[in-house]
Amino acid sequence: MTKQRICIVGDGLSGLMTAVSLAKVPGIEVNLIAKKGTKNVDKRTTAISDINYKFINQNITSLGKKLFWPSKKIELFYESSKEKINFLNIKEDNFNLMYVFENDKVKSLLLKEISKNKIKIIRQDVKNLDELKNYELIILCLGGQSKIYNNITKIRSIKKDYKEIAITGYVKHNLKTLNTSQFFLKEGPLAILPFSQNHFSFVWSVKKSFFEINSKKMTTLVKNKIEEILKSKQDITISNIQSYPIFLSLRRQYYQKNILILGEGLHTIHPVAGQGFNLVLRDIKKLKEIIKYYVDLGISIKNSYALNDFYNSRKPENTIMSLGVDATHTFFKQNKYLDPFKEIIVKNIKNNETLKKVSKIISNRGLSF
Ligand SMILES: Cc1cc2nc3c(=O)[nH]c(=O)nc-3n(C[C@H](O)[C@H](O)[C@H](O)COP(=O)(O)OP(=O)(O)OC[C@H]3O[C@@H](n4cnc5c(N)ncnc54)[C@H](O)[C@@H]3O)c2cc1C
C-alpha cells in the first residue's frame, strides 16, 4: 500500500517533535522542510510536565536521562513593599512535577531521532505553499511571526503586545539545594529553573522600557537581582543572556483545506507559567491519535475530517489555558491601587490545599482529564 505523505515545515521544537511523533504512525511518510543554514542559537530552557515528558519518552528511542532535569517541588514568591512572601509551595513525593531541558540539546536529540527514522529533510525557505501541493497534509510550524499564515487564515486572531521582554540566561552556582521557583517581583516575574546540579536558567519578564534603559548593564543587573532573591553572596556566573519580545497571539482558525498551523503559530503566550510548549505537546499527541485513526481506516487524510476533529478537540483547552496565563500575568502585574489587596490574597493562598491540588493537575495534564 502506498504511504500517505505529510510535510512539516519549520525545524523549531514544534516542527521537530511533530516530525518524530508522526513518523511513528504506520502508513505515513514524513518529510521535514527546514530553512537552509539556520544555526541552533536557542539558548533557552523549557519546563515540561510529567505527562508531556512521558509523551516525548514514548517517541524517542533513547532519551538520555541527563538532558531532562526533574523537579519535585515548586515555590512561588510575591514581592510586597516589605518582603518576598513565599505564598505557595507545590510538592509531590510520588512523581516529578516537571522536567527542564536545554532547547539546543533537545533539538539535537530530535534531529538524531529524525535521522534514525530516515525522515527526509528538505532544505528550503518556503515562500509559496503551492510548492507543497503534492502532500496529503501540510503542517506549518513556522513560529509566531510568519506572514505565510495570512494566506491561510482569514479570521482575525486574538492579539496583544505586552510591551515586555523576556530576558533569559544560564547561571552557574555552588548552592547545595535550589528549588524551581517563580518570584513575582516589582519589575516583573522571574523564574528559576534548575537544569543540572550546578546550573539553573532564568526567565525574567520586564517592561520594554526597563529593558531598553538597562540593556548595556543587563548582566550585572541580573546578577545582583539573583543574589538578592537567593539571599546568597557566593559567586555565581551568568552566561548566554538572550531576549525575546512577549506577545499573546491566539489563532481562531487552525487550518484551511489540508494545511494546518501548529506550535507558536497557533498560540503564542506569555512565558510566566511555562505553558507554551506544554500546549504544543498536547496538540501533537492529539493530532497523532487523529491521523492514526484515519490512516488505519484507509481514509485519505486530505479528504477526511482529521483537521476539523483536531480543531474541535484542541481549541477549547488552548483558548482557556492561554487566557488563563494572560489573567495570571495581569493579576501579578504591578498596580499601586491593587497591590495592597494582592498581599492579603497571596497570604491567604498559602494554606489552600484545594488550590495546590488543582494547580498540580492542570499544570501536568492541562484540561484534558
Ligand atoms: C522566554 C521564553 C521561555 C519559554 N519557556 C517555556 C517553558 O518553560 N515551557 C514551555 O512549555 N514553553 C516555553 N516557552 C514556549 C516555547 O519556547 C515554544 O512553544 C517552543 O519553542 C516552540 O516553538 P516553535 O517551534 O513553535 O517556534 P520557533 O522556535 O519559532 O520555530 C519556528 C521554526 O520555523 C522556521 N521557519 C520559519 N519560516 C520558515 C520558512 N518560510 N521555511 C522554512 N522554515 C521556516 C524557523 O527557522 C524556526 O526554526 C517559552 C517561550 C519563551 C519566549
Image (cartoon, rainbow, N blue to C red):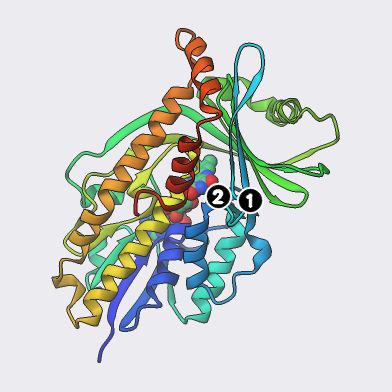
Quarter residue 311 falls in: bottom left
Residue at the far right in the pictured view: 234
Q: Nearer the viewer, residue 65 or 2?
A: 65
Type of amino acid under label 1: Ser
Q: Residue at x 42, y 62 (%)?
A: 15
User: Is 187 left or right of 314, judged from the image as shown?
Assistant: right
Residue under label 2, please give it.
47
Residue under label 1, please give it.
71
Question: Residue 60, how many percent across, how many down?
Answer: 52, 73
Q: Is residue 322 above or below residue 100?
A: above
Query: From where the camera sits, is residue 307 visible?
Result: yes
Question: Residue 33, how many percent across, how many down?
Answer: 40, 67
Query: From where the camera sits, is residue 145 visible?
Result: no
User: Is 188 left or right of 240, judged from the image as shown?
Assistant: left
Beta carbon at label 1 within 8 Å of ligand 1: no
Q: Nearer the viewer, residue 143 or 216?
A: 143
Q: Residue at x 25, y 56 (%)?
A: 313
Residue at the far bottom in the pictured view: 1
Disc 2 versus disc 1: nearer the observer: 1
Which quadrant, please, contains the N terminus? bottom left
Q: Residue at x 60, y 16 (%)?
A: 80
Q: Nearer the viewer, residue 228 or 109?
A: 228
Mark 2 crowdedness (10 Å alpha carbons): few <14, some 14-19, many ≥20 = many
Q: Is residue 236 above or below residue 69?
A: above
Residue at the far left in the pictured view: 303
Mark 1 crowdedness (10 Å alpha carbons): few <14, some 14-19, many ≥20 = many
Q: Which mark is residue 30?
A: none
Which quadrant, please, contains the C terminus? bottom left
Q: CA distance from mark 2 to mark 1?
A: 10 Å
